[in-house]
Image: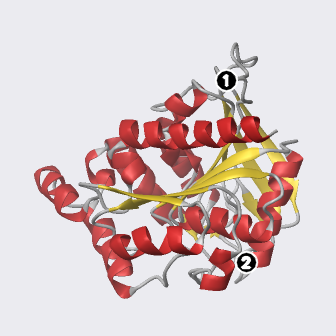
Amino acid sequence: MPENTTRARKDVGRYVSDTLRDRYFAACDAVYAMGAPIRSETDVETSFGTTHVYQYGPERPENPEGPGGEARIPVVLIHGAGSCAATWYPNTPAFAADRPVYALDTPGDANRSVHREPMWQPERAAQWLDEALDGLGLDRVHLVGASYGGWLVLNAAHRRPGRIASVTALDPGGLEKVGLRFFVWVFVSLFATIAPRPLRRRLAGWLDQPVLVVPELRAMVLAGVRAYRIRRPAPLPLTEQELASIRTPLYVVLGRRSLLLNPRRQLERVPRLVPGARAEIVDATGHGPQLDHADEVNRRMLGFMRDVEQLSTRQA
């Protein structure tokens, strides 16, 4: 395959070359293999580019309804910045055993989606997600987003809530302005990936960075940094008025040692601003509770979704 020589737009993410892109995709596939089996892949066209989607779960679920008669609503997973849907590998087995799962590659990040138009602006980001869900034929979903994906799902709950049954935001953006300490953590973590193996294990604990001790993840991150150039600013947090407008059932999971936000502040603030919202802190983790404590966080997330579905059934 020839090298990509198309003139790059300054406001659209791009791969440095086809060769590095293909190496990165191979590294991603090694991570996907650690999660639930992928049932199918599809591309959905939106106003901002082509969104690549991975679907998990049985072709025809034996139990489309829960024990109380509640519908098993599909889960849609939105990953964090700079990566792809493979980062959900610790979570897809639990979700796929319970209900249909769709993991989206966000255009503008290093993945198999094709980015054509900028979508970092809040209204455009909400429009992209709504169009992607429409293209998948999904009229009711549970949204789950991590980090930047957390901002995307919170933003959607504020701007395009119509088809959203619930939102789960994992140590999300969108609650506080991203500070210098978070960027320093990202920078140091990146350099730690090339440290000698014995040192990487120590740094993983110090930095709360599981990427350093999972070889497949480390290889994927390094390949992605080399291959892809992101072209968007950090998103601004939702205002208190915007958060207070959310009426979708909301569950926020915070890492006690998070450097993206102040977990104790948000533990009080989110339920105060968003009626009925649930917020919890997970111990012994930083920015990746769904990676560090996958079994526990999967149980909590699925429990929240079932509570939402049971309440909806009782109110119907």
Residue 6 visible, this orientation: no
Mark 1 lies on a secondary structure that is loop
- Give the vertical position of 91 relative to 126 (above or below): above
Residue at left 72%, top 23%?
A: 69
Query: Are the residues tagged 2 and 1 within 8 Å (C-beta)?
Result: no
Q: How was this image coloured?
A: secondary structure
Residue 309 percent across, percent down from the top left: 68, 38
In the image, farthest residue toward the front = 315
In this view, the mark in front (2 or 1):
1
Disc 2 marks a residue whose amino acid type is: Pro
Rendering quarter of residue 42? top right
Q: Mark 1 points at which residue?
A: 68
Viewer-proximal residue among 106 and 237: 237
Disc 1 marks a residue whose amino acid type is: Gly
Q: Earlier in the sequence, mark 2 or mark 1?
A: 1
- Give the vertical position of 257 relative to 131 (above or below): below
